[in-house]
Amino acid sequence: MGKITFYEDRAFQGRSYECTTDCPNLQPYFSRCNSIQVEERPNCQGHQYFLRRGEYPTTAMDGLSDSIRSCHPHSPGEMKIYERDELRGQMSELTDDCLSVQDRFHLTEIHSLNVLEGSWILYEMPNYRGRQYLLRPGEYRRFLDWGAPNAKVGSLRRVMDLY
């Protein structure tokens, strides 16, 4: 299970709060958030931010608000990818980040997929570049279901949600 640590001040200073499960209300713990550390990965509402493993010495530089009210760290995800529409054709499974779909699965296109667990960001190009598409659990029977203009997929990454 992952952990997120929120700090009131920049560069991981000031009061902090660690979160390893859903945190529906962070306000009782501190009034602002200016840096975050992500170590892996109730009714949350509002603006959402998706963070990957790393350190965020200042939330302002990353476009984050200094008011974070809840979070949802994801457990490891699981996804099945298919070379054809309607969840048909060659199927491959993944449970961790994939820097290059072509290198790992020998595919340049994914026509359908099934997100079984966790949230993922699908990138149009390898090395987590290009257009991004958020994938939540569910079946995506064709690339149009995730909003892409074509089936080109370069990389995939699990994400953590902050609201």
Image (cartoon, helix red, strand yellow):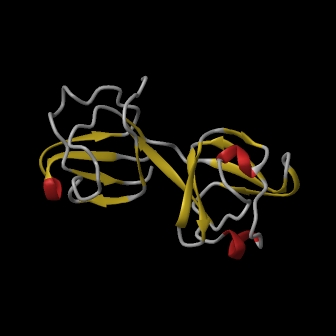
62 displayed left or right of 78: left
Say which of 86 and 100 sits in front: 86
Outermost residue, right direction? 89
Disc tally is 0
Outermost residue, top direction? 43
Q: Quadrant of residue 30?
A: top left
Say which of 135 and 52 sits in front: 135
40 displayed left or right of 91: left
Say which of 100 and 20 sits in front: 100
**Residue 89 position (above or below residue 78):** below
Q: Is residue 114 visible?
A: no
Q: Residue at x 20, y 57 (%)?
A: 58
Residue 33 percent coordinates (x, y): 20, 43
Q: Quadrant of residue 61?
A: bottom left
Q: Is residue 27 visible?
A: yes
Say which of 21 and 122 sits in front: 122
Q: Residue at x 45, y 46 (%)?
A: 160
The C terminus lies in which quarter of the figure? top left
**Residue 25 position (above or below residue 152):** above
Outermost residue, front direction? 149
Q: Residue at x 68, y 68 (%)?
A: 101
Residue 146 percent coordinates (x, y): 66, 47
Residue 141 percent coordinates (x, y): 79, 44
80 displayed left or right of 90: left
Q: Residue at x 30, y 60 (%)?
A: 55
Residue 42 percent coordinates (x, y): 42, 23
Outermost residue, left direction? 14
5 displayed left or right of 29: right
